[in-house]
Image: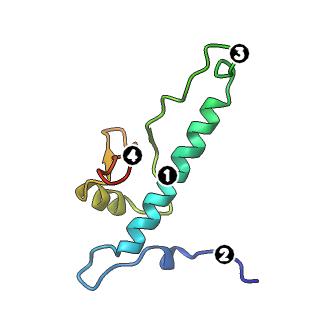
């Protein structure tokens, strides 16, 4: 079995014109979704969110982006309308019309 370690050079690929490849952007969005999911689960696991109390869902909608991708990747995704970056550097996923 081969280890699944990815080197940063293989993780970020560019097209000949200098833009990021579709695969690189897709991996970045997937990493952001995973980080957002884990952050929400961590928040929901705290006291006060159980079924016997008021309950509640996490109010977290944005997270600090994964550091294995440079800021240019997140800026490219923002230009494509996939994410929104706030002034504090937090990144929020934008719902796509075809993806509920």
Q: Which residue is mark 3?
A: 52
Q: Residue furthest top?
A: 53
Image location of residue 93, percent across then percent down:
38, 47
Among the two numbered marks 1 and 3 on one chain, the one whose residue lies closer to the N terminus: 1
SS at circle 1: helix
- Is 24 located above or below residue 47 in the figure? below
In front: mark 3 or mark 2?
3
Within 10 Å of disc 2 (Cα), the crowding (few <14, some 14-19, many 20+) is few
Image location of residue 71, percent across then percent down:
36, 58
Q: Which residue is mark 4?
A: 91
Among the two numbered marks 2 and 1 on one chain, the one whose residue lies closer to the N terminus: 2
Labelled disc at residue 33: 1
Among the two numbered marks 2 and 4 on one chain, the one whose residue lies closer to the N terminus: 2
Q: Which residue is mark 2?
A: 4
Among the two numbered marks 1 and 4 on one chain, the one whose residue lies closer to the N terminus: 1
In front: mark 1 or mark 4?
1
Q: Which quadrant holds residue 26?
A: bottom left
- Is 29 located above or below residue 47 in the figure? below
**What is the C-alpha distance between the residues marked 2 and 1?**
20 Å
| CB contact under 8 Å: marks 4 and 3 | no
Image location of residue 33, percent across then percent down:
49, 52
**What is the C-alpha distance between the residues marked 1 and 4?**
10 Å
**What is the C-alpha distance between the residues marked 3 and 2?**
41 Å
Within 10 Å of disc 3 (Cα), the crowding (few <14, some 14-19, many 20+) is few
Image location of residue 21, percent across then percent down:
35, 76
Residue, x 51% and y 45% (percent of image)?
Answer: 36
SS at circle 4: strand
| CB contact under 8 Å: marks 3 and 2 | no
Residue, x 35% and y 57% (percent of image)?
Answer: 74
Q: Residue furthest bottom?
A: 16
């Amino acid at each position: 079995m081969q280890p699944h370690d990815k080197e940063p050079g293989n993780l970020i690929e560019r097209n000949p014109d200098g833009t990021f490849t579709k695969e690189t952007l897709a991996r970045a969005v997937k990493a952001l979704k995973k980080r957002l999911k884990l952050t929400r689960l961590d928040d929901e696991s705290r006291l006060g969110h159980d079924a016997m109390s008021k309950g509640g869902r996490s109010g977290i909608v944005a997270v600090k982006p994964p550091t294995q991708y440079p800021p240019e990747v997140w800026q490219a995704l923002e230009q494509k309308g996939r994410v929104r970056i706030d002034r504090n550097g937090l990144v929020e996923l934008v719902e796509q019309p075809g993806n509920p």
